[in-house]
Image (cartoon, helix red, strand yellow):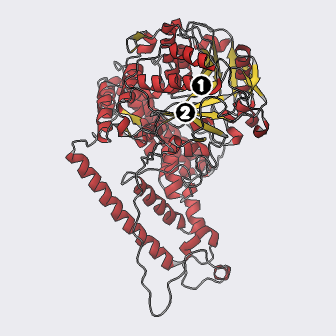
Amino acid sequence: MADDKPTTKKPAAKKAVAKKSAAKKAPARKAPAKKAAPRKAHAKKASVSKATPKKSTPKEAAPKKGPIPAEQVKNPPANNPFAGAVAADLGPYTDMAQLARTMADINIKAQEVLRDAAERRIDRGLRGTVEPADPLNVAEATSEVVTAITSDPLKVMNLQMSLWDNYTKLFATMTEKLSGNKDAEPVVEPSPSDRRFQNKAWEENPALDFVKQSYLILSRWVYEAIDKAEGIDDATKRRAQFHADQFLSAMSPTNVPALNPDVVEEAMATKGANFIKGLENFMADLERGHGELAIRQADLDFFKVGENLATTPGKVVYQNDLMQLIQYEPTTETVAERPMVIFPPWINKFYILDLQPSNSFIRWLVDQGRTVFVVSWVNPGPELKDKSFPDYMREGVYEALEAVTRATGAESYDTIGYCIGGTLLATTLGYMAQQGDERINTATFFTAQTDFSEAGDLLLFIDDKQLANIEKQIDASGGVLEGSAMARTFNMLRPNDLIWSAFVDNYYLGKEAKKFDLLYWNADSTRMTKACHLYYLKNFYRDNKLAKGELEIEGVPIDLTAVNTPVFMQAGEKDHIAPPNSVYRSAKLFGGDVTYMLAGSGHIAGVINHPDKKKYHYRTNENLPDSLDAWKADAEMHQYSWWPYWIEWLNERSGGEIPAPRPGDGELTPIEDAPGSYVKVRAE
């Protein structure tokens, strides 16, 4: 047990260590650092709907809420339209008086939501901050592609003939199927990853099969037409394809209740009660979004950060305006000599690395005999709008490392940077290289980029017009980008999985929200300061200055080829945020010993893959040839999680053992229990 571990005494040379560490030149401060008091939540109060007044009648009391008695289910009243239904399926909707109360309550909520939405729109109009009709600048790209296609009549004719050829084949196939030939080959089939058409009725029912294949033929024809447009650059094509994704996903037959067999079956089983429940869910999401539909992907009441999420024991040992630093309790008597310091992205919350004990990377790493520190970034309010990327380096990386030295006496550290936190760590390494600062012993990067020339789907949103729209949106929110705005952007990158599947589940099927930790984390969005967000988008995504060697931090040029720190780069095969080739290009920018590893799955599941789960795979190759394809050709495939492979890499470069230090053993007095207060601030 951790409580039985011996505590370490402070090293005699601790004061000397602190002075030596302070001598390392960090970026110049704008103002003396102050110890921040625990932050208060900035979350807005949820609007409370008025209760529907109840009227009593002299004849009988109003029906009681709650489940229907078993005897009433067995012997339902003659006038009950739900006679014979199972109470567990229909719940309170077997009670017509309760149904009337529900509909009245929904009506009241609808009026409040509409009033709130109207007031907010008027307020935005008065401030001149009404969002443009096309904030993502995709309609213009689509128009360019359509113009390019229609300018060539021969190409238009060929495209039309291709479309009609496939429809002719479909008519022939359907005729065979209706004639009794069950083995008739489909013209087109959904991809294995498309979960919309899993119900067997989409294949077995000829009418539904015809609708499904018609939709898929049209979808693929649209993508083919965009791809064949001549004289259009790749960025414009990608933006047009994104526009097509949104339109085609919305037009899917699975989004039509009468066509979706799952919805029809549920309606028959519950005698329509699913639609009433779905309407309640719809109004609740509208109310939560203040008139905008905030589709709930997870049960927001079931999970509690610090109770059933982010439960690895530890203490907050340091904090400032931008972050809290958490030191975790050891679970082994001895630990590696160098502590591990983790810099997660501030675009979302750190507990993706500490969801639950069964899939927690932090808990697993502590069990491997590592002293683990994690930065928990603040969920910033308007008062921090001027904090920029260099501030995150100064008050995030530098102050965290100095605090770790004060907590443990260590002069050298192993580090991890995840996603945008990895970009920050890489930039800091480049800055340190110019200062002769060699405190960082190893640097591991989880799906992080330093070369943004092939930076995936987010490049769709980084032209000057869209950046101007983002700036207006941030100004309208007082100097911070609301978490909901970034969440919508990420959801739109996968509209079928993250928007429309939830739409069908919540509003047509009337399902309860899922108790899924990853989806809860995904919904627990964070704000971003204007200065930092625009700096990141312009300097990294748009201008790619870090890869070009053109980035400067307060006059210091950042040159990654001067970084000789051993580097481990992890990428995900299906990552659409940090594509594997983009990460590979990033790996080749460093000047020292670099190991690239390609994991199965994507941006999250490719990282969070506990060995006990025995899922996915990973590929390794000790060499770093010119291209990713060449690397793959000689790579070795391994089953399951890459974590054991990585810890072996780390142990080879960071050995030595010391008695395990606990929070409070050093100079820093614990402030509060992990996961701290910063991570609990929600951005509603």
Q: Position of residue 282 (x, y in %)?
A: 45, 58
Quadrant where the image shows the N terminus: top right
Q: Can residue 411 be seen in the rendering of this structure?
A: yes
Q: Which mark is residue 318?
A: 2
Q: Which residue is found at the position 61% from the left and 41% from the top?
A: 674
Q: CA distance from mark 1 to mark 2?
A: 10 Å
Q: Which residue is found at the position 50% from the left and 51% from the top?
A: 296
Q: Which mark is residue 345?
A: none
Q: Position of residue 533 (x, y in %)?
A: 39, 29
Considering every residue shown, the one lying at the far bottom of the view is 59
Q: Can residue 578 be seen in the rendering of this structure?
A: no
Q: Is residue 555 above or below residue 140?
A: above
Pointer 1 and pointer 2: residues touching (CB < 8 Å)?
Answer: yes
Q: Which residue is found at the position 67% from the left and 81% from the top?
A: 74
Residue 287 occupies which quadrant of the picture?
bottom left
Q: Is residue 355 left or right of residue 435?
A: right
Q: Position of residue 64 (x, y in %)?
A: 55, 80
Amino acid type, label 1: Arg
* Other-residue count near label 1 (Cα within 10 Å), few / some / many at <14 / 14–19 / ≥20: many
Choose between 161 and 260: the one closer to the eye. 260
Amino acid type, label 2: Tyr
Pointer 1 or 2: first along the chain: 2
Residue 371 occupies which quadrant of the picture?
top right
Choose between 500 and 485: the one closer to the eye. 485
Q: Which residue is mark 1?
A: 406
Secondary structure beneath disc 2? strand
Secondary structure beneath disc 1? helix
Residue 600 occupies which quadrant of the picture?
top right
Choose between 523 and 167: the one closer to the eye. 523
Q: Is residue 16 above or below residue 321?
A: above
